[in-house]
Amino acid sequence: MNKKNNNTSSENEKRKKIESNKRPNSISANISRAIKPYIKMDKPVIKVPQEKSIFYLNGINKSALQSAREKYLKRIETTANRYRATVKPFKFGTSLENNYSQIVKATSVFQNLAEKTFGKHSENMKVAKLLMRHGWATSEFFYNDILKNNYNKSEDEILEYIETFYTENNYQRFYRVFNLVIEGFEDQNLNEGYRLLLIKIRKMIRQNFDNYDLFMNTLFSIAEYVCCYKFGILSTNGYIEKNNIKAARKKYADENGSLTEIDLMSMFGVLTRWWDKTNFKKGLEKTAFGRNSIEHGRYDPRRYKKTDFIKLIVFIFNVLMAPDPDKHN
């Protein structure tokens, strides 16, 4: 009888062991699903002091970021505290049965907090794709109100929102991005000549923003320089064209060939559109806005808009903010 009980006890122990080995996989899968849209967050593309790590440009930690940094850190600290409170009861020394519900709760809390901070990834993606088609590069981590505040809105409403976002208060947010671009050139040791040009351009448009159309060709040249630098072809005979864009995109894509990170998806969407071949036969009044039509003198300057200038600066910022493609995965 004792032998039978011992066998039964042994079988129960084996069954529990098997179940405990299975359970972590389901937990891991549950957590993975929750954080998948934000999984690249462990690779900050901007370096600031270690105790204040956030997602911004490589090396920028100067006064231009102070206000944005403080606001961002406050939001992150609030999120972290709530998450700590949720996972605190979890102890590895206790059984999975006792901890499982707590882990599921922590996963749910993390997902809710992440969505509260960054917005819902799937909805952000919809807004980003619409704006991308109109030449707007966007980010899920920097100025992400552009995405979060435009769910279920019409195309016209979204375009009006982003234009107002960058132009209100005398272009305050736009100049913040412009300042970061200039500092990015210094922090990433990019060409000093282009950095000085950007400083002159900023000075001229601050005096009168209507001067913006004088610099469209120059900005496209700077944008191409930054792309060549980022894609590692600056010291070669290569330039930004279909094949090099495709090769660079492949380095950032996942195993299915998709760009799941909005910052990168948006960047490549605008890049592909602006560096696409242009039908010059349409004439200066009808050619598409882009590098080729403007640099080759096939775009009537009277067609320029202030938002075109803003889009170029924001695009350059997104390229500077992108991680090194060879180290991305």
Image: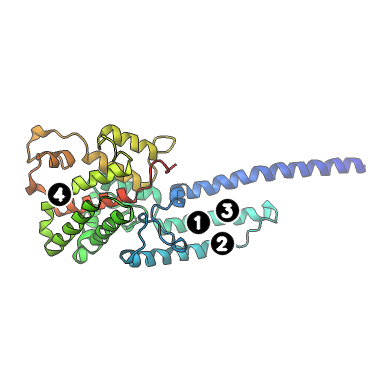
Between marks 3 and 4 in the image, the one whose residue lies nearer the viewer: 4
Amino acid identity at mark 1: Phe
Labels 2 and 4: the sequence-earlier one: 2
The amino acid sitting under disc 3 is Val
In the rendered structure, which disc, 1 or 4, sits on the residue that comes first in sequence?
Answer: 1
Q: Residue at 44% across / 59% down in the picture?
A: 53
Which x, y percent locates residue 159?
Answer: 22, 52
Viewer-nearest residue: 286 or 295: 295
The crowding category of the residue bearing disc 1, from other C-alpha atoms within 10 Å (few below 14, some 14 to 19, many at least 20), is many
Q: Where is residue 293 shown, x and y percent of the image? A: 13, 39
* Residue 244 placement (x, y as % from top left): 29, 34
The earlier-in-sequence mark between 3 and 1 is: 3
Of callouts 3 and 2, the N-terminal one:
2
Q: CA distance from mark 3 to mark 1?
A: 10 Å
Q: Residue at x 61, y 55 (%)?
A: 101
Dot 1 falls on a residue whose secondary structure is: helix
- Between the residue at mark 2 and the residue at mark 4, the CA separation in whole angstroms equals 51 Å
Q: Which residue is mark 2?
A: 86
